Amino acid sequence: MWKEFKEFALRGNVLDMAVGIIIGGAFTPIAKSLVDDVIMPPLGLLLGDVQFQDMFVVLRAGEAAGPYATLQAARDAGAVVVGYGMFVNTILTFVLVAFAVFLIVKVFNRMRRQEEGAPEEATTRLCPHCLSTVPLKATRCAHCTSQLQAA
């Protein structure tokens, strides 16, 4: 079992996956900040000075009766609430992260296709007499000993 685990852990794919997970973990706070600090404030202003993080529905009032100005105030009062504004923020963060990953994969695939499509420089040619493969610089075919013209 140790041998199988070692083969699995030392495969190149596992290292690539680990790097991807670490980069993804580091990228998520950036996307969250973009949503919370850059996208949502102007969107909230356009919708009539709405603070998305404070959008909630009270299911049951707490010790102090509502209305509650913020989600935190409702929670502090012990109210049971559904904080759908935070859910909207989380969905937007997910969409941004997913779109960024899509763009990275798209660029990576394009670079890979360009690499694979590049023609390799020929190092051999066919002998015109016996059609055997001979090096480009050969002056005589090793198979039929025919004289070859310089390439």
Image (spheres, rainbow, N blue to C red):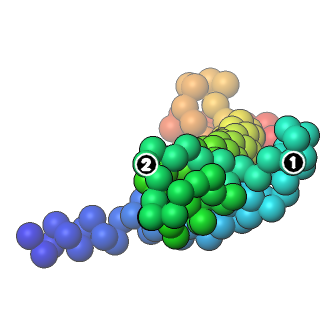
Q: Secondary structure at mark 2?
A: strand
Q: In the shown orientation, is residue 134 left or right of residue 39?
A: left
Q: Disc number at residue 34? A: none
* Image location of residue 45, percent across then percent down: 90, 46
Q: Residue at the location (84% across, 54% down)?
A: 41
Q: Secondary structure at mark 1?
A: loop
Q: Disc number at residue 60? A: 2
Q: Residue at the location (34% across, 71% down)?
A: 10
Instruction: Name above or below for residue 48 compared with residue 34.
Output: above
Q: Residues within 10 Å of mark 2 (few under 14, many from 20)?
A: few
Residue type at mark 2: give it: Arg
* Image location of residue 78, percent across then percent down: 44, 64
Question: In which quarter of the view is residue 37 placed?
Answer: bottom right
Q: Please name whichever residue, 63 or 127, is drawn nearer the observer in this view of the structure.
A: 63
Q: Quadrant of the C terminus?
A: top right
Q: Please name whichever residue, 57 or 130, is drawn nearer the observer in this view of the structure.
A: 57
Question: In which quarter of the view is residue 106 placed?
Answer: top right
Of circles 2 and 1, the one toward us is: 2
Residue type at mark 1: give it: Asp
Q: Residue at the location (59% across, 47% down)?
A: 56
In space, the residues marked 2 and 1 are separated at their CA atoms by 26 Å
* Image location of residue 51, percent across then percent down: 76, 52
Q: Please name whichever residue, 70 or 86, is drawn nearer the observer in this view of the structure.
A: 70
Q: Is residue 9 visible?
A: yes
Residue bearing mark 1 = 49
Between disc 2 and disc 1, whose residue precedes?
1
